[in-house]
Image: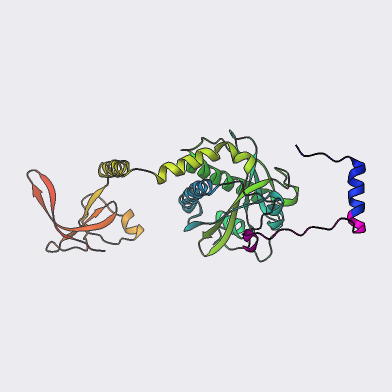
Amino acid sequence: MADILNQDEVDLLLSAVSEGEVPLTEKAEAPEAEAELAMSTYDFRRPERVSKEQLKGLQSLFEAFAREVSIVFPPFLRTVVRVDLTSIDQLTYDEFILSVARPTALSIVNMSPLEGNAVLELSPTMVFPILDRVLGGKGMTLAEPRELTEIENRIIQRISTMILDSLKRSWEQLIEFHLSIVAQESDPLIVQIVAGSEMVILVGYEVHIGETVGTMNMCMPLLVLNPVLDQISRQTHYMRKMSTQMATHTRKTINDIIERAGVDIEAVLGQTPLRLDEIMRLQVGDVVQLDSSPDEPITVTVGGLPTFYAQPGRKGEQSAVQLTNLIRG
């Protein structure tokens, strides 16, 4: 074992070095010293805590979430809505808060059964077109954002609830969420769900509502997501490693389900335009002339889409049609 110097010996050695009595030895040059070391920058204030496998799983879940929102919004807003996932980033909570514009629409979301809260942020460029459409307008945005009124806040709370319902459905194979809105705020600086130095997952979306484009962000602290990150990683691994036999079986199962699905088939004998007052005067025995001719084939629709041409007739005691040609789109 090497001898351990006491304090007096350490002071004596330092004094001898400073006075030149003990020469400083140069570092021996070894062949390895000539090779440059490969170095990479690492910021200890921003550790990357989510693995690539987990990020892939999160991306799959948040893409499913975007599809769910794209399905739910159009009937409610009476226009075309498209939601695109644009980014998934790891950053500190302080960096997220400082990047959010003021004022904005922030919903603090309880992530039960996970412990903790998340933040759903809807930008003014998304909020005001939605409000305009809900209140009967064409979906116009405002030149200068402002804070929401009490009535507008209630509408946006309903919109946020619809978004959270979509999040539940997109994650239901992994976890059964019981999400609820704890509070709504317009100033991001007063929303503190975790310490500023804590890492979060920030998911960014671009939301197309008619002709306008807004943004939506979902901020989830890693402290909240940690209990399910391993499940997400395993799920991604399973999906990637699915065997050929399992893939064939899955494809066959899906085909069987689709083949048993019911669709409506209608034979359209003809059409004619009528004014509302003419319809009101119709009586039993009146004849309505259609725009079709007995010599022309009729159209058969499948699921509401024109698919075949056919010739009307009878089979036994029942009316029937004989398909003649396929309508090519």
Is residue 76 positioned above or below 224 on the image? Answer: below
Residue closest to the far bottom: 143
Q: Position of residue 72 (x, y in %)?
A: 48, 49
Q: Position of residue 78 (x, y in %)?
A: 48, 55
Is residue 230 positioned above or below 62 on the image? Answer: above
Q: Nearer the viewer, residue 299 or 239?
A: 239
Q: Say whether residue 300 is left or right of residue 191.
A: left
Name the dominant secondary structure of the magenta segment.
loop
Is residue 71 positioned above or below 116 on the image? Answer: below
Q: Nearer the viewer, residue 106 or 254?
A: 254
| Point 8% across, 47% down: residue | 315
Q: Position of residue 243 (x, y in %)?
A: 33, 43
Does residue 30 belong to the magenta stretch?
Answer: yes
| Point 26% across, 47% down: residue | 264
Q: How is the image coloured?
A: rainbow
Residue closest to the far top: 113
| Point 54% across, 36% down: residue | 177
Q: Nearer the viewer, residue 108 or 303?
A: 108
Does residue 114 belong to the magenta stretch?
Answer: no
Residue 115 can be seen in this image: yes
- The quarter of the rendered structure image containing the C terminus is bottom left
Instruction: State which region is magenta.
Output: 17-41
Is residue 180 positioned above or below 138 on the image? Answer: above
Q: Say whether residue 274 is left or right of residue 298.
A: right
Residue 109 can be seen in this image: no
Q: Position of residue 117 (x, y in %)?
A: 65, 40
- The quarter of the rendered structure image containing the N terminus is top right
